[in-house]
Amino acid sequence: MSTSNISHSSRTLLVLAFAIIYVIWGSTYFAIRVAVETLPPLLSGAARFLLAGGLLFAVLRMRGMPTPAAAQWRHSMIVGLLLLVGGNGLVVWAEKTISSGLAALLVALAPVWFALLDWLRPAGVRPRWNTIGGIVIGFAGIALLVNGRGADASGNGTLLGSLAVVAAGVSWAGGSLYSKHMPNSASPWMNAATQMLCGGAGLLVAGLLFGEPFRTNWSAISGRSLAALAYLIVFGSWIAFSAYVWLLQVSTASRVSTYAYVNPVIAVFLGWAFLNEVVTTRMFLGMFVVLAGVIIISLPRRAAAVRSQAIPKHVQITSCS
């Protein structure tokens, strides 16, 4: 095969991988909304991550990767609880009362929580003025989105669901920062598998404590909810994450991070087109305000990433969905 053919093949694979993380991760909010129509939110999240993490763990062990040590399991438990129970679990629970598009837009505020928590932690990094400006703009976007009533429910249900997604973003940022400053030297693949197993176990316990097995009408579970759960396992947790890990190896972190700007737009469109979710003018305005704040916050980090061409050593699953 000629050099030009190899180059063309590589470019095609690169475009395909970006399309996967843009579209699939953007569509997971839609899939979650469909899944929780008849499935219990916490237990469906537990099934997703226990199955995805269990299969990945089995494959890695069959390929000769050593069994994680106790310290790695402790690390994965903390990160898994923060990312998948606090982060993903609250998003799934919230989508029982708010639209998938609103959930995705509120999740897009993650860089705001990263900047704030990184500032407040011991020996934290004081944000630059443009970052502070981005944080203020991000909070303005929250106000527009929540008041825009981009949800199926109204009143307290909408407010509570929105606050749950905001809390999910804070938990996600906290888990990511913990992982960054308390890194685990194990394989990123094994880290992902153990984090999914620990997070899935945490969601299972939470679902049991909240009585989901007893409050769920199991005979009424629909085929479309089960199909949505299968989509989240196969496409959201396996295919998209594999594409993400590969992209971090062959591209710059700043380019890969652009998925955060595209996912909310995909989610809003799918919710409007297929779930008849209401998209108001105020919600559109809130979307642009949120994305503007996120871009302003991300600019200095992106510039630094481009200069160093650095690739993170400790890869995490980086979407609350």
Image (cartoon, grey):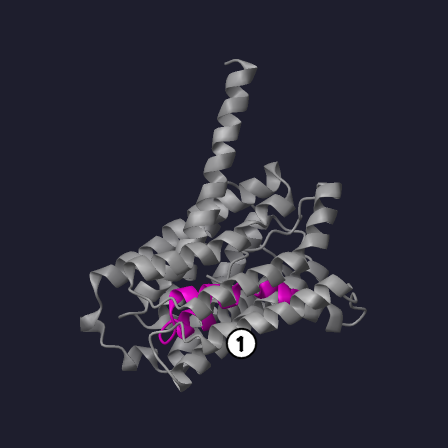
40 is higher (above) or lower (below) than 315: below
Q: Which residues are magenta?
A: 90-114
Residue under the point 74% across and 48% down: 304
Residue nearer the viewer, 13 or 142: 142
Residue under the point 28% across and 58% down: 274
* For residue 117, side relative to residue 147 (left or right): right
* For residue 272, side relative to residue 146 (left or right): left
Residue under numbered circle 1: 143
Q: Magenta part mainly helix, strand or loop?
A: helix
Residue under the point 39% across and 76% down: 207
Instruction: State yes or no: residue 80 in magenta.
Output: no
Mark 1 residue type: Ala
Residue lying furthest front: 281
Q: Secondary structure at mark 1?
A: helix
Q: Residue 208's image quarter?
A: bottom left
Residue lying furthest bottom: 156
Residue 278 appears in the rendering: yes
Residue 178 % position (x, y): 67, 65
Residue nearer the viewer, 242 or 124: 124
Residue 200 appears in the rendering: no
Q: Residue 36's image quarter?
A: bottom left
Mark 1 is surrounded, within 10 Å at the Cα level, by few (under 14), some (14 to 19) or many (20 or more) other residues, namely: few
